[in-house]
């Protein structure tokens, strides 16, 4: 081994530093443009609603126009547009936040707006988030632990929990990816994408009673966004059918997650005349595949029997999942 190898490697570390710094600046710039765009749209919508005869209902017209003129663009449905308007109206007269607004990801802005009870609390979490460069998970951890309240009540000002920082995780969230129209980057996401695309076609081909509604279907609970892998409607059952794919072994918490989605769908999406939603959990691993159905506990035995008859046969679905998993995981 050359004696010069180690010193040379240390010298070359500067190249990695240059690359990392450039990527960080690029991500910050993209995030700043995204937030500025939401701010300007929010300002436009605020003025539009103030001048419209029927107020906020004009947002429905804007959402429909965007969907028709640019169907590939994401995040500009009624809920997304309303939150841009709320964002602008919340901070338009607040000089404190001006230097902080573009330093925080849109996901974290939504968390702060929905989870703060006062202007002071919003200011606190915005400052903390900008200073510590929190990702969504890190900010959630602080807010869930009521750090603001504990900080204000403490005679000795508490320091936030120390967490390792990664600018890519704090800035590069779902909204930035959608804004840039970038492809999925991690291998697990690529595996999921490949399996999900094939499963969608398989379920649609299973019977004419299945209608596809959306992929990564966004629902909101408590001001936070959640995404369902695939959402179908079954005409024979008159119900929504969310499908969730997990890579790896089946875990009990998967049932809790799909039940959470079922409650949200039945509360906010299901029409009064429709039946309760039924969930499908698919677990694809190297050595095994599992298919489970999640049904409401309030269903009668007759309704459960009807649901079972109209849903894809478990063994058939499991066999297809195993086939797709073998191909996707084998190529990973």
Image: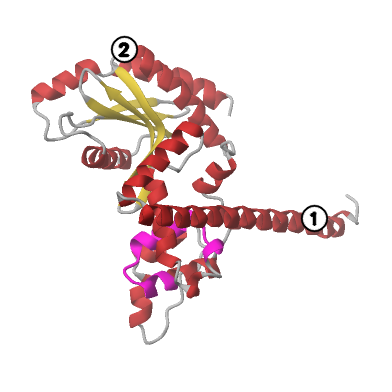
User: Where in the figure is residue 8, as x and y percent of width and height?
Assistant: 87, 56
Q: Is residue 166 left or right of residue 315?
A: right
- Residue 229: quadrant of the picture: top left
Residue 117 lies in the magenta stretch: yes
User: Where in the figure is residue 281, as x and y percent of width and height?
Assistant: 33, 31
Q: Is residue 63 above or below residue 161?
A: above
Question: Around disc 1, counting alpha carbons within 10 Å, would you say few (fewer than 14), some (14 to 19), or many (20 or more)?
Answer: few
User: Where in the figure is residue 261, as x and y percent of width and height?
Assistant: 29, 40
Q: Can residue 4 be seen in the rendering of this structure?
A: yes
Label 1: which secondary element: helix
Residue drawn at the location 35% of the way across and 66% of the way down? 116
The C terminus lies in quadrant: top right
Q: Is residue 164 left or right of residue 16?
A: left
Question: Around disc 2, counting alpha carbons within 10 Å, would you say few (fewer than 14), some (14 to 19), or many (20 or more)?
Answer: few
Residue drawn at the location 71% of the way across and 59% of the way down? 21
Q: Nearer the viewer, mark 2 or mark 1?
A: 2
Residue 275 or 50: which is nearer the viewer? 50
Q: Which residue is mark 2?
A: 207
User: Where in the figure is residue 52, as x and y percent of width and height?
Assistant: 35, 51
Q: Which residue is mark 1?
A: 15
Label 2: which secondary element: loop
Residue 169 lies in the magenta stretch: no
Magenta residues?
Answer: 101-124
């Amino acid at each position: 081994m050359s004696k010069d190898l180690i010193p040379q490697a240390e010298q070359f570390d500067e190249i990695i530093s240059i690359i990392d710094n450039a990527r960080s600046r690029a991500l910050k710039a993209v995030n700043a443009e995204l937030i500025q765009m939401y701010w300007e749209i929010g300002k436009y919508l605020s003025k539009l609603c103030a001048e419209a005869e029927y107020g906020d209902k004009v947002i429905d017209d804007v959402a429909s126009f965007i969907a028709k003129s640019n169907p590939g663009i994401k995040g500009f449905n009624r809920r997304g547009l309303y939150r841009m308007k709320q964002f602008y109206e919340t901070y338009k007269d607040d000089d404190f936040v001006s230097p902080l607004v573009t330093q925080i990801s849109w996901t974290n802005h939504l968390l702060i707006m929905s989870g703060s009870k006062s202007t002071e609390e919003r200011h606190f979490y915005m400052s903390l988030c900008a200073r510590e460069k929190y990702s969504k998970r890190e900010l959630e951890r602080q807010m869930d632990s009521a750090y603001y309240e504990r900080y204000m009540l403490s005679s000795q000002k508490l320091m936030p929990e120390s967490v390792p920082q990664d600018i890519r995780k704090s800035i590069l969230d779902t909204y930035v990816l959608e804004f840039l129209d970038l492809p999925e980057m991690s291998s697990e996401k690529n595996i999921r994408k490949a399996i999900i695309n094939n499963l969608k076609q398989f379920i649609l081909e299973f019977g004419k009673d299945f209608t596809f509604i959306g992929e990564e279907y966004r629902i909101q609970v408590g001001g936070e966004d959640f995404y369902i892998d695939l959402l179908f409607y079954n005409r024979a059952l008159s119900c929504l059918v969310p499908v969730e794919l997990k890579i790896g072994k089946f875990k009990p918490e998967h049932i809790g997650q799909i039940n959470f989605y079922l409650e949200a769908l039945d509360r906010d999406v299901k029409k009064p005349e429709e039946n309760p939603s039924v969930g499908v959990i698919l677990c694809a691993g190297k050595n095994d595949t599992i298919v489970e159905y999640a049904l409401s506990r309030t269903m009668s035995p007759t309704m459960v029997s009807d649901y079972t008859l109209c849903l894809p046969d478990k063994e058939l679905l499991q066999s297809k999942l195993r086939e797709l998993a073998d191909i996707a995981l084998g190529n990973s």
